[in-house]
Image: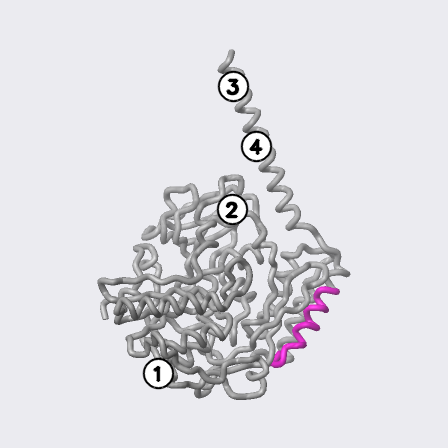
């Protein structure tokens, strides 16, 4: 009898938990699927167009006629009522059509959505195909390297094509699309395709032609990888004493410890690293900038000051850059200067904005050997400023401002900084836990 009562209690608790989970699921997904009436959507649509008109070079990469045709096509897609997701599907291609990295439309709800609603995949795009680099789905056949064929009935090729049309990239830089998607796929996927209570994934295991279909329900526990990808360190150093090599990882140049920008903290950390490099008689230094989308030029200036032995030009000397307090020249550090040490910069397609500008100066002045992939940005960009969020959909907006450039010979705007040594991180490297860029440096 006692055992029977325990079973009843257990089942009751299980049913209650399941009911609570369903309630939570319904409350989140239902909220995401709330409809907004057409009159309000039209008002937001017009507000967006007015904001885009503030861009100083609105038709630099798209003709006015092509832009207006696109606007009319997308305007005709406005329905009697739509969700925020559906409105984003209509408007994001218009924003991306300007070819400006810093002109963006953002659905911030993604960052407030519990991890358990996220697609259980970390993906890697290579040769226009999508691969899983983790084994997070409860299916032993989906091993790292599995090719993703479909997600919820949509082919991976269609997903890739669709998401690229929504990503803001300087001059439609192809290297940036791939680099950004390899890091931010979950954001772009869920912002465009939304959240579901169940994800059905069609895939082929690594090195197999057999096709499987697996499902993932959001009521399953949140996976640890979802925490890991949001808590990677932004700044750090690894000392390889055997090879007398220091590897400095800089995730971005907008350092926000505890939520507030603190450039002084960034500088102090770099100062500490430089002293450590000198104290330990390091002979090679690698700045790992892969995934670094940019940030504050004060940070990039600080890095450069340790790499030079004489004053160099940085930003172009004009009234615009001076009004923005951009550093026109950079003077060398006299303490712990590493200009006499062999230095490398590791790059990928996500290196853009201030990162791309710094790399243009590095390459022009031959301050370091650049290794990796073509960057997603170049010597010139339109810095962004915040704009008023759309009134009813609450989608965030950023708009590019007057173009600014660093003081190097003019480069093509639709090409990134080309590395001195091209080495691409590939799927088999990720599967095997291998880093060909670092291996190249350590063997030099």
Vertical placement of 84 versus 212: above or below? below
Vertical placement of 52 versus 106: above or below? below
Which quadrant of the figure has residue 282?
Answer: bottom left
Magenta segment range?
Answer: 43-59
Q: Residue at x 41, y 53 (%)?
A: 132
- Which one is in front, 360 or 104? 360
Mark identifier at residue 6:
3
Residue 296 locus on image (x, y percent):
51, 72
Tell me the crowding category of disc 1: few under 14, some 14 to 19, or many 20 or more residues within 10 angstroms, Cα based. Answer: some
Mark identifier at residue 199:
2
Residue 204 locus on image (x, y percent):
38, 50
**Cα distance in 3D space between marks 1 and 3:** 76 Å
In the rendered image, which residue does mark 4 sit on?
A: 17
**Cα distance in 3D space between marks 2 and 1:** 56 Å
Verify whether residue 341 appears in magenta: no
In the rendered image, which residue does mark 1 sit on?
A: 309
In what element is the residue under mark 2?
Answer: strand
């Amino acid at each position: 009898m006692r055992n029977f009562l325990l079973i009843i209690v257990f089942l009751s608790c299980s049913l209650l938990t399941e009911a609570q989970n369903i309630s939570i699921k319904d409350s989140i997904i239902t909220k995401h699927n709330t409809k907004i009436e057409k009159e309000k959507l039209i008002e937001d649509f017009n507000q967006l167009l007015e904001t885009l008109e503030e861009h100083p070079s609105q038709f630099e990469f798209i003709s006015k006629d092509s832009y207006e045709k696109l606007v009319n096509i997308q305007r005709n897609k406005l329905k009697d009522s739509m969700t925020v997701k559906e409105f984003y599907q209509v408007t994001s291609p218009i924003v991306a059509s300007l070819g400006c990295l810093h002109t963006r439309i953002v659905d911030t709800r993604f960052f407030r959505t519990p991890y358990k609603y996220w697609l259980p995949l970390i993906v890697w795009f290579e040769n226009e195909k999508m691969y899983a680099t983790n084994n997070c789905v409860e299916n032993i056949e989906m091993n790292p390297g599995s090719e993703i064929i479909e997600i919820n009935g949509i082919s991976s090729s269609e997903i890739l094509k669709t998401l690229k049309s929504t990503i803001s990239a300087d001059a439609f830089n192809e290297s940036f699309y791939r680099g950004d998607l390899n890091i931010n796929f979950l954001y772009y996927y869920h912002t465009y395709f939304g959240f579901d209570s169940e994800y059905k994934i069609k895939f082929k295991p690594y090195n197999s032609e057999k096709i499987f279909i697996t499902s993932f329900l959001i009521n399953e526990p949140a996976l640890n990888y979802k925490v890991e990808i949001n808590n990677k360190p932004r700044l750090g150093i690894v000392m390889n004493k055997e090879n007398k090599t220091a590897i400095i990882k800089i995730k971005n140049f907008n350092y926000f410890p505890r939520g507030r920008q603190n450039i002084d903290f960034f500088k102090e950390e770099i100062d500490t690293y430089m002293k450590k490099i000198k104290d330990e008689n390091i002979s090679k230094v690698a700045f790992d900038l892969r995934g670094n989308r940019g940030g504050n030029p004060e940070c990039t200036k600080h890095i450069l000051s340790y790499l030079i032995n004489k004053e160099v030009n940085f930003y172009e000397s004009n009234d615009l850059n001076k009004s923005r307090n951009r550093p026109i020249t950079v003077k060398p550090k006299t303490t712990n200067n590493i200009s006499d040490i062999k230095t490398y910069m590791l790059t990928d397609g996500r290196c853009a904005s201030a990162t791309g500008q710094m790399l243009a100066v590095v390459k022009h002045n031959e301050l370091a050997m650049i290794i990796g992939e073509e960057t997603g940005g170049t010597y010139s960009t339109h810095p962004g400023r915040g704009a008023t969020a759309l009134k009813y959909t609450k989608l965030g907006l950023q708009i590019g401002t007057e173009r600014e450039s660093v003081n190097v010979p003019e480069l093509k705007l639709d090409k990134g900084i080309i590395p001195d040594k091209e080495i691409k991180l590939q799927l088999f490297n990720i599967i095997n836990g291998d880093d060909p860029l670092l291996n190249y440096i350590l063997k030099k």
